Amino acid sequence: MDLDARHLYSICFDQPILEKNWNCKVGKDGMVDLCKNEEKSLLIQWTERNEYKKRVILSNADYEIQIVYKDYRTKVLDPSQNKSPFRIEVPEEFKRYKVY
């Protein structure tokens, strides 16, 4: 499936794709329902929205991918745990070397 990785943001956060060759339809609730690219024969549909759940279907003539979100609320980390969402924990068995 020929999908630009930059479109994943729009897919995950229910945003219309605002690029040439894309046509998107917004529903009465103000949420994007589908986006279509005729040139690539690509269709993205947001369906089964129910509270914090949804299904996104990406399809073309050859493939169909379904992404099911069971809970897509933003989760805030507990600051008392001193964990940063932008820090990678290094496993204890890894060794560090300093190169001069």
Image (cartoon, grey):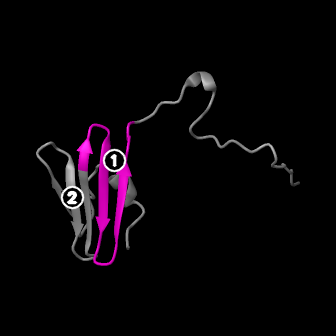
Give left or right: position of 61 versus 4.
left
44 is higher (above) or lower (below) than 72: below
Image coords of residue 72 (percent x, y): 38, 41
- Considering the whole magenta stretch, tell me its main secondary structure: strand
* Residue hosting label 2: 34
Q: Residue at x 57, y 24 (%)?
A: 79
Give left or right: position of 89 versus 49.
right
User: SS of the residue at dot 1?
Assistant: loop
Quadrant where the N terminus sits is: bottom left
The answer to which of 3 and 54 lies nearer the viewer is 54
Q: Residue at x 32, y 78 (%)?
A: 62
The answer to which of 32 and 61 lies nearer the viewer is 61
Quadrant where the C terminus sits is: bottom right
How far is the residue under mark 1 from the one under mark 2? 13 Å
Amino acid at dot 2:
Leu
Whether residues under marks 1 and 2 lie with C-beta atoms below 8 angstroms apart, the answer is no
Mark 2: few, some, or many residues within 10 Å (few <14, many ≥20)? many
* Residue 22 appears in the figure: no
The dot on residue 13 is 1
Magenta-highlighted residues: 48-73
* Residue 92 appears in the figure: yes
